[in-house]
Image (spheres, grey):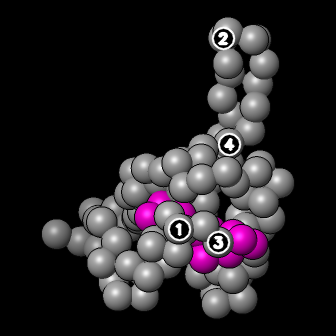
Amino acid sequence: MKAEDFTNYPIKTKLIYSTEFEDAFYDSMLVYSLFDLSGLGNISEENALQALQKSIETCCLAGININHHFKQVYIFDTSIHTLRADWRLSRTGLNLIIIQVPFLNNKIAVWIWKLAEHKVV
């Protein structure tokens, strides 16, 4: 067999498939939403968005890919016919946001304590 009989595939092609798989993997880990914060007490949308912004800044400063933990999505509410923005979050992303919430209540305090003990389920 001669060298001309072989097909050389550029490395770029292999990286594209690798990136698509990696993106799909991290997207599958985005199982929480910013709406889930409402279960922790009376957290206003403004406070949640401020905590989200600080969490994204934390990732950027630490050199962490924010797309692995935060993804903006749009949800159409059929009952009132409006489109609203929401965020899909990884567990780590949700934990970062909870740490950044500007006030404490008993549920948030317990969550942060469990984070400190590495016992969050």
**Which residue is label 2 attached to?**
78
SS of the residue at dot 2?
A: loop
How packed mark 3 is, by other alpha carbons closer than 10 Å (few <14, some 14-19, many 20 or more), is some
Cα separation, mark 4 vs mark 3, equals: 23 Å
Q: Residue at x 30, y 66 (%)?
A: 121
Cα separation, mark 4 vs mark 2, equals: 15 Å
Predominant SS along the magenta part: helix
Q: Residue at x 65, y 80 (%)?
A: 59
Q: Are marks 2 and 1 in contact (CB under 8 Å)?
A: no
The kind of residue on which mark 2 rests is: Thr
**Which residue is label 3 attached to?**
104
Looking at the picture, tell me which residue is in the foreground, 113 or 21. 113
Cα separation, mark 1 vs mark 4, equals: 25 Å
x and y, in percent, of residue 78 in the image: 66, 11
3 or 2: tag closer to the N-terminus = 2
Q: Residue at x 69, y 34 (%)?
A: 74
x and y, in percent, of residue 99 in the image: 60, 76
**Which residue is label 4 attached to?**
86
Cα separation, mark 3 vs mark 2, equals: 34 Å
Q: Are marks 4 and 3 in contact (CB under 8 Å)?
A: no
2 or 1: tag closer to the N-terminus = 2
**Which residue is label 1 attached to?**
106
For marks 3 and 2, give the one nearer the viewer.
Answer: 3
Q: Taking 7 as reference, is 52 left or right?
A: right
Magenta extent: 90-103
The kind of residue on which mark 3 rests is: Leu
- Would residue 119 be visible to someone looking at this image? yes
x and y, in percent, of residue 45 in the image: 77, 49
Q: Taking 60 as reference, is 13 left or right?
A: left
